[in-house]
Every structure is written in structure tokens, then in C-alpha cells.
Image (cartoon, grey):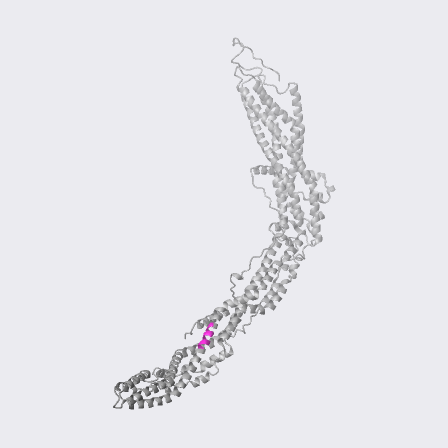
Amino acid sequence: MRLPGSLGPLVLLLGLELALCRGQVASQYCGPQGQAERLHFTGLGKGRWLDPQARPLGSLDPLYRMVRGFLDVVQLNPFPEGLVRVALNEPSSVRTSDVVRYEAGYVVCAVIAALFLLIVPTVGFCFCCCRCRRRCGGRVKVEHKSMACERGSLMTFLLLITLLLLTGVVCAFITNQRTHEEMGPGVRAVPGMLNSLQGLVSDVPKELQAVADQFSIPQNRVLDELDGVGVNIGSTIHTQLRGTVYPMLASLHRLGQDLQVSLDHLQLLNSSTVYLQNHQEPLGSSLQDHRHKLLSLLQDAQCQGCASVLSHSQLLELGANFSQVPSVISVLQKLKGVPEANFSNMVQKDNSTFNTLPLLTAMETADIVQELKEEVTHIPEQVRGLSEGFPGSEAADRWRQALAEAENSSRPYLHMIQKYERYRWIAGYVLSSVVLLVVICNLLGLGLGLWGISAREDSSHTEAKGEAGAQFLMVGVGLSFLFSGPFILLIFATFLLGGNIQTLVCRSWESQELYQFADTPGNLPPSMNLSHLLGLKKDVSIPSAYQQCKKGAALWKVLQLNGSYDPEKHLDINKYTARLQEEVRKFRVDMKDLDLLNEAAKRDLEAFRSSGIEKIDYPSFLAQVHKPVLKVDILKLIKELEKLGQAQTESALGQQLKQEAQTLQALYQEKILLQQAHAVALNRSVHALSASASNLQLVVSETLVNASTLKTELPVRAHWILRNESECFLNRELAYFNQYGDWAREMVTKHIATCQPLSGALDNGRVILCDRIANPWNAFWFCLAWCTFLLIPSIIFAIKTTKHFRPIRKRLSSTSSEETQLFHIPRVTSLKL
């Protein structure tokens, strides 16, 4: 059966929605407005983070590897754990023999340096004395056949050595400058790292408290949204139900109007029928009397032209017999008092009630919202105690004091390092420049000497070029002897310091032997013990702590505080949110004031449905109302009688016809006209009721069913919407607290209570000390030592080559002797050395 109007599909749709709602108890749809916005928290703990230091690969890396390989050969002994332990705990008990035994490779190098320092300057002094007496060096006295080969070999070896010297001095300049450039930033980074580490433990409680204080951000957001939660939920219920309620109210309004119209028609039908029935018999008697009288007058022989009027007069009688229509009194008796309800006022009241649903919902949830605000206002105890259980202020003070003392005590040494580094840089620059001068002298000497040799066969040649080349070579020899002592002293001083830093510190640092040494009980003094410094109940394994810190482990795990401190316990706000969930799920909305169909209206519809208005014999009514009240057109008959009366020659007969016309005219005005009006009204009511009664009865029946269904199902639907919106609201508010929890965990574990700055500081310290300072430092003395020891063969080959650049006293053969050349002016050759 198709429901009339638009109400039926809406009720079916509502029933389908309710069935789906019951089937998806656990599911929700919140829409975009149900999504929680992103909260913004203030970051903490960034001040302690150090930028990771790294030395990029460069062209000097092969040189650095060569130096480290050389140092590994010099220092073959492993890390001296016992010696370092004694030096840290009882410095006065350190035995020299143990130090010498460990530093055996450096002792050998020291012996070599001492021999160099003793022998080379001594040889240089002797050579100088010998040269002053003209017994050393000099020139080639006699030319022989193999002299050219000998001279070429000496020049080649000297050139090769000079090129090696040039390579070494270039590397020395570069590494000297690199060391100087890295020393300043490296030294300045030490206080920064120590200052950063001071807050690693001491600042954690304060920053944890700052994290706890930011719990107010989601709190305030939830409190703001609680202010409008009732109105928002009510608006959502109103929005989702108005597609059903508004059509229902509109249908009830139309039904009330249709019901009133039907009642009016039924009452009019009854009144018209009663009137027609009551006045039909008197009217019929009057018409019959007038008919008999007219017939007697018109049938008179003296009546002229009466035949046409006679046929009309014979039809002067009633056409419709209203006594044959059924009575509707029983139907009217059943509808007595209907309408009892004012449908228009009822619909207006329900519409007003429905439109105020957001405000009513807010009023009904006001008490629960106030309780929720009181709950939200209180910060959970576990969040407030986020900093509790961490090492106390006493341990933090000891940690800060130890690092502050280390920072303060290191500053004079750091200033001293920078000061002496400048002296070292100047000395290195000067000595490298000396080596460069030796290289230049050798190259100039070789060039001028070779030029002088190639020009000897020229008659105009002088020995000045070769002599100048020899002088340059001797200047190089003199510089080599003169600065051999400063060379070896600077080399050994930087070698001893840089080599031990590399072999004792950097090598063991890189292999983590230093951490294992620090982890062994008794190796470190109590003032340097991390567990003792922080007052921990358990000893902390330094290698394990370093590896955990490098992986980003939390500080409480590294310090083994799991028994006394657990941030998850403090950040667990499930009990707090469970209370919120319990309160939010108490939200209720009461729709009892939305009657849709009150009892009076329901009685009206029930009475109309049981009245039997659709069972009235409308065909009987229609059969009579379709007949005329009179079979003849009485107005036409009256006009004909008036004309006929005027046309009569017999005045008495004409006068009688006129009187009869006047009598019929009066009858028409008094009775027939009213009878016809009631017949017209009856006709209109019968047609209206016959067309709408059955359909209206069906609408009334369906409205009663649908109104009852909606009154039952609307609260269920409203409750489901309320529950869905409450869950969406709850999920959104919990999402704010979850954002805080996730942010707090990240802050605590990755930024505040993380020991990654410790591993970062250690790694940065190793990179700065070993990669950026020790590597170029050691490469510098290595290059300078390379040049210094190459000066010995340079001296030897320079002295031997010098003889070949000076003039030869007696040649083996000559192509232009003094005897064979006429008018030859002898060339003066200086034999002075």
C-alpha cells in the first residue's frame, strides 16, 4: 500500500536509519568537525644539544693514515691500564721505569733525536772550520773522463732530494696552518660542551616540571569546547532530525485543515439534507395546487395560445426527491465534539519545542558539563609529579659543581694552549720557511751551476754563473746546519705530545678502551665516578651507557632509575580520561515535550477514523443532487404566463393568469430559491466528501500509526545521535590529551631526559681532539721531520755538487790552448775559495 503524501517515505526512511543505528552500535561518524586540531606546545631541552662535529674527507687523509701507521709502529704497547690507574689515583706513586717501559718507542725516537742534535750541529761546526781553512769543499782539481757522469748523478740525486724537500715543506705549511685554524675553535668548544653537560642532569627536574605545566594547554582547550558542547550536540540532533520532524509537522498541519474542511462539509451536508427534506413536502403540495389551477385555466376554451404553456405547466412538480437520501446523523453523532484539538496551535507548539532543542540540550547537560569542568580543571597527581623520582637536587648540584669546576679549572689551561699554539705556529712557519729557503737555494744553485757548466766551452764564458750556483748551494748547506738544532727540538716536542695523544688517548678512545677502563671499579678516583657523583644505588656501565646514549636511550634507563623513576607512570592519564568518559556518557536529552500528536488530536483522529464517513451512501446523494429541484424552469414559466395573460382578450382570464404568475414568483422567492441554494450546497458537499473521504480516512489511519511510531522512535534516534556526538566529542577531547601525552613522551625521552647530548659531547670531543687537532698536528711534525732528515743527504749532495760548479784547475784536454791561439789574451781565473 502506498502511503499518501510525503510522510510515508520519511517514516520508512527513519525506520531504516534506526535499524542501521542499532546495527552499528560500535561505529561512529563524526565528520570533519569531529577531528581534533593540532595543539602547539613549547619545545624544551634544545639548549643542551650540540651540533654533531665531523671532519669531512680531504686530500690530507692519506698523509694522516701514514702518520697513524708510523705512530702504531712507534707505540706497540697496549693501553697502560695499570699505569693510568696509578697516575689518576696516586700520582706520586708512578714509577719512572714503568713510564719508560711503556714509552720505549718514544725513548728510541728521543735517542735518535739526541744523536741528531749532537752529531749534525757538530759536523756542521767542523765543516765550517774546515771551510775557513780551505781544506774542505773547494773545487775539482783535475778533470777526468768520468767527471761528467759523476756530476750528472750528483745533480740528479740533489734535484730528487730537493723535490722531496719541496713536497714535505708544502705539506708542512698546509698542516701547520690547518692545526692553527682548528686549535682555536676546538679550544673554544670545550667550555660550551662542559656547560651543555651541566644541564644534562641538573636541568632535567625543572624542565620536567615545565612539561607538566604545559598540561594546561589541552586543559584550556577542553574547557573552551565544554562551554558549547550542549548547544553543539543539540544543534546536531536538530539538524539530523529536522528532515523527519518538519515534514511530519507539515503533514499534521495539512491533516488538521483537511479534517476541519471535511467536518464542515459533513455538517453542511446534514443541514442541507434536513432542510431539503423538511421543505420538500410543503413545496410539493404548493406546486401541485398551482399546477391544478394552471391546468384548469390553460385548458379553458377561451384561453388563446395556451397550448405551448400548457405543456410546461404540466411539468410544474418536484424533480429531486431528497427523502430518498440516507441520514448522516449517526456519523455526526460520532464526530460530536470534533475537533477537540487545535491542530494549528499544536503544530506551532511542537515546531517551537523542536527549534529550541539546542538550548534545551544545553540546559539538560549543564550540570554534567559543570562537573566535567571541575574534573578537567584538576591536573592529575601523576602529571604534577613528573619530576619526582629523578635524581634529587643534591645529586644535581654535585653534577653541576663537578662540571663547573672542570670548566673553571680548564679555562687557564685552554688560554695557555691557545698562547703556546700561537708560538708553535710561528716557530713552525719560520722553520718551514727555512726549509723552503734551502729548497730555493738548491734549485737556484742547480740552475746556475748547470748554466755555468753548459757555457764553459764558450770563449767569452766566465765562471761567475757556476760560482754563484756553488754559493747558493753552500748557503743551503749553511742554513741546514744552522737550523738543524731548532728543527729537531720542535719536531721532538710536538712529536712527543701529539704522538702520545694519538696512541694513548685517540686510539683507545676510538676502540672504546677508555670507556672500559673508566668502567672498571677502582680505576677512577671517587671524584670522577659517575655513580658516586649522582648518588646512584647501582654502578653505571660506561660502555653500555655510551652505546645506549648513542642510540638515543632515555637518561633514566642509562642511570638505571627504572626502579625509582618511570615517566610512563606519570604520563599515564587513563584514570583521568576514564573519569571524563564516565561523565560525558551521562549526557541525556529529553524529547517528551515533543508530542507530535497530543491526546486531544489523537482522539479527534480516532473519532474521524471510526465515524464511518467513508461508508455514507454518496451515490444516493449524487443521484438526487444531479436532478433539478423542479422539472420545469419556473422563471421561464412565469414569463410565459405574464405574456399569455396580456395576450388574452378575455380580461378576467388574463387577469387570473397574471395573478398565477405573481403567485409562482412569490413561491419562487420564498421557497424554491432557498431549496435550490441548499441543493447546490448539498451538491458541493457531497462531491467534496465523496472525493476525499476514503483517502482522508487512509491518511488519518496512517497518521495515527506513523505519529505513534515517530513518538517512539524519535527519542531512540535522538539518543543515538546524542551518543554518537558525545563519543565524537569525547574522542576529540581525548585526542587533545593524547597529543599532550605523545608530545610529553617525545620531549622527556628525546629532548629533556635523554643522554644523547652526553654521547654527542664525547663524540664531538673525540672529533675535535683527534680528527681536527691531533691529525694535522702529527702530520705537521711528520712533514717537518721528513724535511729535517732529508737535509742530511741534501747537505752531502750539495757539498759534492758544489765542486763541479766551480772552475777546474787543470783540464784533461783543451781545444783552444794559449799556445795555438795567436794574439790570445790569457783569461784570469780566480783560485780563491
* Observer-nearest of 658 and 402: 658
The residue lying at 63 percent from left, 41 percent from top is 186
Q: Residue at the far right: name it.
A: 92
* Observer-nearest of 342 and 11: 342
- Asked whether residue 791 is in view, the answer is yes
Quadrant of residue 259 in the image? bottom left
Quadrant of residue 731 in the image? bottom right
The residue lying at 52 percent from left, 69 percent from top is 355
- Asked whether residue 77 is in view, the answer is no
Q: Residue 184, how many percent across, how many down?
A: 64, 39
Q: Is residue 83 magenta?
A: no
Q: Is residue 254 magenta?
A: yes
What predominant SS class does the magenta segment belong to? helix
* Observer-nearest of 575 and 147: 575
Give the residues drawn in magenta, as a range.
250-259
Q: Residue 135, how many percent across, how many down?
A: 64, 19
